[in-house]
Image (spheres, helix red, strand yellow):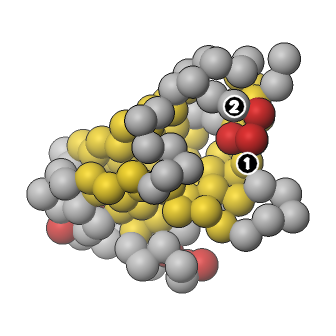
Amino acid sequence: EVQLVESGGGLVQPGGSLTLSCRGSGFTFSTAAMSWVRQAPGKGFEFLCDIDSRGITYYSDYVKGRATISRDNVNNSVFLQLNSLKTEDTAMYYCAVNPWTKKENRGQGTQVTVSE
């Protein structure tokens, strides 16, 4: 059973930065492609970025130029650093093992609120 636990969310001012962390278990982390997605209240999921087992990354236009995804296969962890945060970045952020569209492949999420 896939288990993913996110942390690092919170309240941050516009223009600020934060780093989200996610620890996985129940699957072979080192060979899994991992994603970060988010969901704002009343909206659908937005794919943000992913990283494959080789460390190759891909970023969507939602965060391109403002985000860095990385992974630590020793500690079964994936990270998302977000910079230049905007109020529209306010959402619940989830890490996921691909395919992220399956609910059981996502964690419980960590809330990020961008506000003065």
Q: Is residue 75 visible?
A: no
**Would residue 46 be visible to someone looking at this image?**
yes
Q: Is residue 19 above or below residue 27?
A: above
Residue 96: image location, x then y, percent = 47, 64
Residue 101 percent coordinates (x, y): 54, 79
Distance in Å between CA atoms under marks 1 and 2: 11 Å
Residue at the spot 66% in from the left edge and 46% down from the top edge: 110
In the image: residue 88, left or right of residue 100: right
Mark 2: secondary structure:
loop
Q: Nearer the viewer, mark 1 or mark 2?
A: 2
- Name the disc covering residue 86, or none: 2
**Mark earlier in primary sequence (1, 2):** 2
**In the picture provided, is 100 more to the left or to the right than 115?**
left
Could you tell me residue 62's position as x and y percent? 55, 50
Which amino acid type is marked by label 1? Ala
Q: Residues within 10 Å of mark 1 (few under 14, many from 20)?
A: many
Residue annotated with mark 1: 91
Q: Residue at x 57, y 24 (%)?
A: 84
In front: 30, or 50? 50
Q: Residue 53 is drawn in which quadrant? A: bottom left
Tell me the quarter of the image containing the C terminus: top right
* Residue type at numbered disc 2: Lys
The percent position of residue 100, horizontal first and vertical second, equals: 48, 73
* Displayed quadrant of residue 74: top left
Residue at x-position 63% and y-position 28%:
85
